[in-house]
């Protein structure tokens, strides 16, 4: 297990309430069924002042979401880097797992193998691993993807109907997420025709 010694100080619930999602913190690296006696880099999922009852929700750099009661002596608490603090062990990243949606025009087995081969050449044969693979036929049709407020369409233009992307294949829609409070609207693609008179 690769860890790094970091000088940090444990925060009280009052101090955590003054933090925001942009502030780097450290929380227990232990996950369900895997207790680890070290910490993980993390950040709050919202402004500290928005949490009630002294319970805060943090998301670690490794994607784990945990609930923490900083003032509970039985918990590992929430820590922040501080040269006046004490040394703690912080779990380091072993690498990144890329979750990609790759579009290969007229994709076939040979072109996919060429992609994997290029990745192995760049990072090393024993490094790149194929965890899962989904090959889906992509329909040869284009759509216009919009997002609009969940409450419904108020007008055909302006802030209430924001064009998110153009000319995408429907299969790729499922890899996108709408903005908070908005929903996707998918329509058949319409070419933009410029009717401006010319001399």
Image (tube, grey):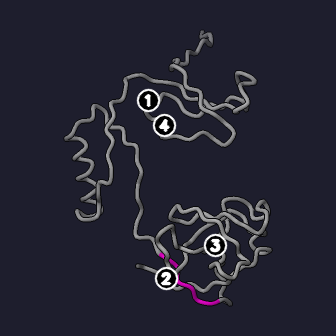
Question: Quick one: label 2 or label 4, which is nearer the N terminus?
Answer: 2
- Give the label on residue 118, or none: none
Identified at 46% across, 72% down, the residue is 34
Disc 1 element: loop
Residue 70 at what x, y percent from top left? 71, 75
Q: CA distance from mark 3 to mark 4?
A: 32 Å
> Which sits in the foreground, 155 or 93?
93
Q: CA distance from mark 1 to mark 2?
A: 44 Å
Q: Which residue is mark 2?
A: 4
In this rendering, is residue 67 above or below 161?
below
- Give the label on residue 174, or none: 4
Residue 83 at what x, y percent from top left? 65, 88
Q: Which residue is mark 3?
A: 25
Identified at 73% across, 32% down, the residue is 159
Disc 4 element: helix
Question: Quick one: label 4 or label 1, which is nearer the N terminus?
Answer: 1
Rate crowding at label 4 as few (under 14), some (14 to 19) or many (20 or more) other CA atoms within 10 Å: few
Span highlighted in magenta in the image: 86-91
The label nearer to you, 1 versus 3, is 3
Q: Is residue 154 left or right of residue 66?
A: right
The label nearer to you, 4 versus 1, is 4
Locate residue 122: give its quadrant: bottom left
- Dots 1 and 3: beta carbons under 8 Å? no
Residue 78 at what x, y percent from top left? 66, 75
């Amino acid at each position: 297990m690769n860890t790094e010694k970091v000088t940090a100080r444990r925060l009280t619930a009052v101090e955590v309430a003054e933090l925001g999602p942009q502030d780097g913190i450290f929380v227990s690296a232990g996950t369900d069924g895997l207790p680890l006696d070290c910490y993980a880099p993390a950040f709050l999922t919202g402004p500290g002042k928005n949490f009630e009852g002294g319970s805060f929700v943090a998301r670690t750099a490794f994607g784990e979401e945990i609930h923490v009661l900083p003032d509970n002596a039985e918990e590992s608490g929430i820590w922040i880097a501080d040269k006046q603090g004490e040394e703690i062990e912080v779990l380091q990243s072993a690498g990144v797992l890329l979750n990609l949606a790759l579009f290969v025009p007229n994709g076939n087995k040979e072109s996919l193998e060429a992609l994997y081969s290029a990745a192995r050449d760049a990072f090393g044969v024993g490094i790149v691993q194929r965890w899962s693979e989904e090959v889906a036929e992509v329909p040869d049709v284009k759509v216009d993807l919009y997002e609009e407020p969940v409450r419904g369409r108020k007008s055909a233009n302006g802030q209430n109907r924001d064009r998110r992307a153009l000319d995408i294949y429907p299969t790729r829609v499922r890899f996108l997420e709408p903005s908070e409070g908005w929903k996707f609207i998918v329509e058949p693609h319409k070419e933009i025709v410029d009717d401006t008179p010319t001399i």
